[in-house]
Amino acid sequence: MSKNFYVTTPIYYVNDVPHIGHAYTTLAGDVLARYRRLMGDRVFFLTGTDEHGQKVEKAANSVGETPLELADRVMKRFDSLWAKLGIEYSDFIRTTQERHKVGVAHIFSQLMQQGDIYLGEYEDWYCTPCETFWTETQLIDGKCPDCNRLVEKLKEESYFFKMSAYQERLLAHIEANPDFIQPKSKRNEILAFVKEGLRDLSVSRTTFNWGIPVPGNERHVIYVWFDALSNYITALGYPDKGGNFASFWPVDVHLIGKDILRFHAVYWPTFLMAAGLPLPKKVFAHGWWTVEGQKMSKSLQNVVEPNMLIDRYGVDAVRYFLLREVPFGLDGDFSHSALVNRINSDLANDLGNLLNRTTAMINKYFGGVMPPCGELGEIDNAYRAKSVAMIGSVAGHMEDLAFSKALQSIWEIISAGNKYIDETAPWTLAKDPDQKDRLATVMYCLAESQRLVYTLLAAFMPATSAKGLGYLGSTAAPSADALAWGRLAAGTSITKAEALFPRIEEKTE
Ligand code: MSP
């Protein structure tokens, strides 16, 4: 049954250029969006850039640009990387766009009018890089508990959001909805945090200007996280509650990194409650990538640049590696040798080789024309049953956002295919003219199983999927309809495949 499906990435700060951490969340969103589209859903996939706040203002000053000039320049770098990474988003929101500013001002005004936002005074420790206030007791050795950098004491008139008033409702919601915050370990952290008590939240600043003015009091700009989180609904046209908002809110899943979970699992739901809007169905926090065992940082000069990786290894190898190497939700380590290993073993040896063997044999034994399938024997039935079961297990893993398990399920069928060739020994069958029908059945099962594999791969490795399906003579766009055994028609032309992924010699890396 077709449904509407809405998935988001965080909107990225424009004071930094994109690295694999950013590419990772966006890629996960793209794979999920492509998978749901494949299954026939109507999908809205949102990404964008977070362009306000002191951090962006400071970065712009330091390079002698206006914040908007900086944002215009850096947002293009994100956007061109997304094109290169094969990201098919539905919309790219920038927080400096009029549609967004209007929406944020609307929500802020509504909350002010109903007394959920009030004017008060603030005195606390502020961490600029994290754009977060901390109390004295939250600091660790006098430094920011999140990033361990210096904090400054700030006293300012500020608007506050009555977050404390929503503590009990939020707690009840988290407890009643076990899937709301995932993975489970992160859910427990948030539960503990909320149980400690929620303070009212400062939601405006007077110490800089680069932001959306508070309606009716232009000395204040709206807190960057209040501004940024609202993108998830302003992009749907909110405050207009018709159109995309009616179709896609509440969101099916917000994909984020673990460092920004509190904003998404505490602040954002309480803002929504106050605004009288339904809460996200799921917030999923993935882990962080280190590089060759170390934290990625500009000072260590080990930031992995996705453009360079794609130029060197190809887009689908990078897409495969990032989602296969580390279970989604856990931390992982990036290394060139791990990437090269995956390419050589999983992509060249297993995936590519099976297609080469299969298409070469169909060309050699049947002149490149798919013969009709004869009666299936025990070994064929087992291979067929496994191949069909893959569709269901991938569906289950995608439901859990277990991308690496979904890929494992697909690779089990690729291994099963290579084993099936060894066991059926087509080269022996080919020597005996009486075995021609048997040989045809083996060729059919091999090609048909891989047609299912390459159809599912459309979500993960779009270019590879298209190539594989092309060699197997499938001309229609991959769809849920194609995910049924027996759709491959006798008479289809099968082309001998080139190596999809040439092996990479480790020494030269
Ligand atoms: N602008 C905010 C998000 C606002 S969403 C309403 C922000 N931006 S960010 O550019 O700093 O980070 C965006 C995402 O990149 C986060 O989800 C973060 O977890 C992710 N990553 C940054 N470095 C990362 C790694 N080293 N590894 C994996 N993801 C990482 O936060």
Image: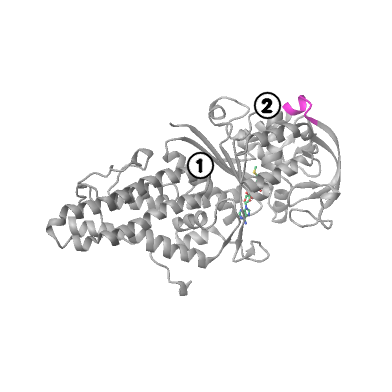
In the rendered image, residue 223, in percent from the top left (x then y), is placed at: 74, 40
Whether residue 244 can be seen here: yes
Residue at the image position 79 percent from the left and 39 percent from the top: 197
| Disc 1 residue: CB within 8 Å of ligand 1 | no
Question: Which element is circle 2 on?
Answer: loop
- Looking at the rendered structure, the secondary structure element under dot 1 is helix
Q: Along the horizontal axis of the image, is 10 left or right of 339?
A: right
Q: Any magenta on residue 501?
A: no
**The residue positioned farthest toward the front in the image shown:** 378
Given this view, does label 2 or label 1 mark the residue nearer the observer? 1
The front one of 391 and 340 is 391
First in residue order: circle 2 vs circle 1: 2
The residue that disc 2 covers is 276
Answer with left or right where residue 425 lies relative to residue 152.
Answer: left
Is the residue marked by circle 1 packed among few (<14), some (14-19), or many (20+) residues within 10 Å?
few
Whether residue 51 appears in this view of the structure is no
Q: Residue at x 40, y 67 (%)?
A: 503
The percent position of residue 181, horizontal first and vertical second, equals 63, 41
Q: Residue at x 24, y 54 (%)?
A: 443
Residue 423: x %, y % from top left: 28, 60
Q: Is mark 2 within 8 Å of ligand 1?
A: no
- Tell me which segment is drawn in magenta: 110-117
Q: Horizontal placement of 229 versus 387: left or right?
A: right
Amino acid type shown at disc 2: Gly
- The circle on residue 399 is 1
Q: Quadrant of the N terminus?
A: top left
> Do the residues under discs 2 and 1 have CB atoms within 8 angstroms?
no
Q: Amino acid at mark 1?
A: Glu
